[in-house]
Image: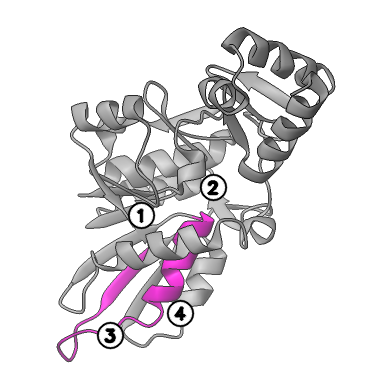
Amino acid sequence: MYAEERQNRVERLVTETGRVAVVDLAREFDVTSETVRRDLAQLETRGVLRRVHGGAVAASLTSRLEESVPSRLGRNADAKERIAATAMTLIPGSFSGAIALDAGTTSGRLAEHIARWKPDAPHQSLVVITNSVRIALTVADNPDIEVNLLGGRLRAITSAAVGSTTIAQLARLRPDIAFIGANGVHAEFGLSTPDEEESAVKTAFTVGARRAVALVDATKLGEETLVRFASLADLDMLITDDSPAPDLSAALADAGVEVMVA
């Protein structure tokens, strides 16, 4: 296979999956790792991708990239649905207490399930704490749910309340479970997101809850974005749609994080 053919194939793979690994490409093309790295270097020069440790990611996947919630809703929809359905097993009809949901799209998918939540016993209710206007509206019509919408400055891109007012309110709350999204989960860097103010709220959700559960689809595993908001040790559980890579899996096990694959 000629270099141009390999590079065209790599470009298609990056477009389809968002990430490629040197070892996988070398095996697929039956060439050396050095040949693959030269191909990646040329593609990076052309702006097709960005090289990272062990491979490359789409050029659009930078540490500061943050898309609006509507633009992300349909991406990896099947994976997010499976993750949300699995997360619902932690909130059965017998559950009595408070949960917190941040402004992520997977949290939003979970909110759609929660909107149909029914208690096992009369006069039993579920408290939902969120900084997301979208999530609050999603669950608000359920008469068995009490919604606590946090105040603060509204970030238009995520429809989420952020800032000192939001953090101060969270400091007075201790939900039983916090469901948190992340843009990256990395063995060394931990959980991260592109925006500093959003990161501060996610930190407050994570450390303030009795149990912290990350809802992260597999495309974000092994990734790092600009701001770390929690270490792996701050998590109790990770719900994802595919098994983490060996290094991340080992780091999660060392941190005592339970991993559920939806």
Tag of residue 162: 2
- Where does the magenta region start and end? 103-129
In the image, 125 versus 261, the foreground residue is 261
Q: CA distance from mark 3 to mark 4?
A: 14 Å
Q: CA distance from mark 4 to mark 1?
A: 18 Å
Q: Residues within 10 Å of mark 3 (few under 14, many from 20)?
A: some
Residue ID at (46%, 37%): 200
From the viewer's perspective, is residue 172 above or below residue 193? below
On the image, the x and y values in percent for residue 67 come to 68, 47
Q: In the rendered view of the protein, which quadrant contains the N terminus?
A: top right
Instruction: Verify whether residue 140 appears in magenta.
Output: no
Residue ID at (66%, 11%): 35
Tag of residue 57: none
Residue 44 sits in quarter = top right
Foreground tag (2 vs 4): 4
Residue ID at (28%, 45%): 208
Chain-order first, disc 2 or disc 4? 4
Foreground tag (4 vs 1): 1
Label 4: which residue? Answer: 140
Name the kind of residue labelled 1 in the image.
Phe
Q: Residues within 10 Å of mark 1 (few under 14, many from 20)?
A: many
Q: In the rendered view of the protein, which quadrant contains the C terminus?
A: bottom left
Q: CA distance from mark 1 to mark 2?
A: 17 Å
Label 3: which residue? Answer: 118
Label 1: which residue? Answer: 179
